[in-house]
Amino acid sequence: MLKINSSYYKESEKDLPLESIVTPESLSGIFEIDQKTIMRVTRKYPMRINPYFFSLIKKVDDPLGRQAIPDLAELDQEIFLKPDPLWEEPQSPVLNLIHRYPDRVVFMVSSQCAIYCRHCMRKRRLGQEKQVPESVIAKGIEYIRSTPAVRDVILSGGDPLMMSNNRLEQILSLIRQIPHVEIIRIHTRIPCALPQRIDKSLTDMLRKYHPLYMNIQFNHPDEITSQAEAACAILADAGIQIGSQTVLLKGVNDDPDVMMNLMQRLLQIRVKPYYLHHADAVEGTRHFRTSIETGLEIMRHLRGRLSGMGVPQYMIDLPGGGGKVPILPEYVLEEGPRELKVKNFEGEIFTYPLK
Ligand SMILES: *Cc1c(COP(=O)(O)O)cnc(C)c1O
């Protein structure tokens, strides 16, 4: 049996080992799954599952297994699927920095993740390098410094929290020295994928760099364990506002009741649902994509039945670098000169006076 060791992440100056502790061999020993099949997939898209996340998986195709265990469907080819549909590379003025919107940039400072999500939107880059070179970080910071329009810097990756506190602090302090940068966001899946990483020494460092926001990713209620809850409490107690960027995934959370439960649990652990992302048309992730109608049905279910605080915005990210756009259920049935005909969350029709 596989040893589950919660101290897999060691707070040290070294980055984590690249290798997955869970191997195709150990996987095939535990689940009914063929080692050769897994290896066919991992030759193209590497696997990484840490012992904590692995301990939560009960079956290969349960909601957590689907997100972490390689699936032959990843090798399906489909003409409309692209390695980089959102044009992140063409919209990078310098390596690892995406500048799509006027006032904010995504800065990919880490190339490591606690687990390699099978639905990753940056699957094309999976496991390609151990560390982002110092020169790339330096050029990114120089770009931000010389671009006064940038008010908001999103640290992403990979996962920024896979870096040691010291390395992360070096980057945060350089960005904070730039006067026009108002807010910093850290985009990470660590509270879900390796919550043991979050501790007071991390937040003692982070809180020096406020206003600092964090966006995380929980996709299923089973990911919200007591450890994940404790991690979010440590962050929230340090004054860090946490949002969830959930991804709508077939076989994981494409169900109104599961999604409702997830959003309720997120509010309970002090995480505000921010976005519900429709799965992008990324090569190797087709088996996760749902219809837009599925997403809209979920949104109609949430609105009115769940605290408004818990209703995320449902977003599609436009191919060709057009950016994110919200998709909304239609509530206005008819617009007359004097009144609107509006459907409420229970399907009842009301008249709303305009004059
Ligand atoms: C999603 C995204 C952002 C941030 O968008 P918000 O709507 O402000 O959260 C910024 N840049 C890029 C390239 C993005 O994909």
Image: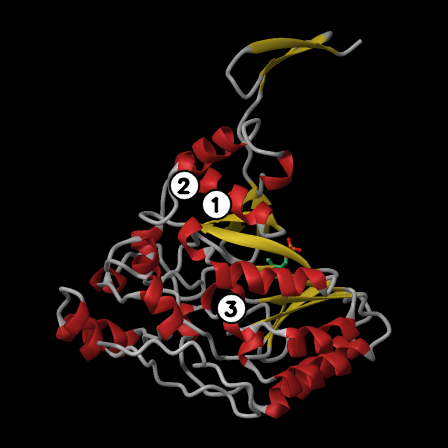
Query: Which circle, 3 or 2, is nearer the viewer?
Result: 3
Quarter of the figure that contains the C terminus: top right
Disc assigned to residue 258: 2
Q: Hey, which residue is sitting farthest right in the picture?
A: 179
Q: Which residue is mark 1?
A: 262
Kindly check if marks 2 and 1 are in contact, taking CB atoms under 8 A apart as contact.
yes
Q: How many marks?
A: 3
5 is higher (above) or lower (below) than 296: below
309 is higher (above) or lower (below) than 21: above
Residue 133 in percent (x, y) is at 56, 90
Ligand 1 is found in which quarter of the picture? Answer: bottom right
Position of 341 compared to 189: left or right?
Answer: right
The answer to whether any part of residue 86 appears in the image is: no
Q: Helix, strand or loop at disc 3?
A: helix
Categorize mark 2 by other alpha carbons within 10 Å: few (<14), some (14-19), many (20+).
some
Q: Which residue is mark 3?
A: 195
Categorize mark 1 by other alpha carbons within 10 Å: few (<14), some (14-19), many (20+).
many
Q: Of marks 3 and 2, which one's residue comes earlier in the chain? A: 3
Residue 146 in percent (x, y) is at 79, 78
Q: CA distance from mark 2 to mark 1?
A: 6 Å
Is the shortest distance between ligand 1 and the CB of mark 2 under 8 Å?
A: no
Residue 308 in percent (x, y) is at 63, 35
Is the shortest distance between ligand 1 and the CB of mark 1 under 8 Å?
A: no
332 is higher (above) or lower (below) than 310: above
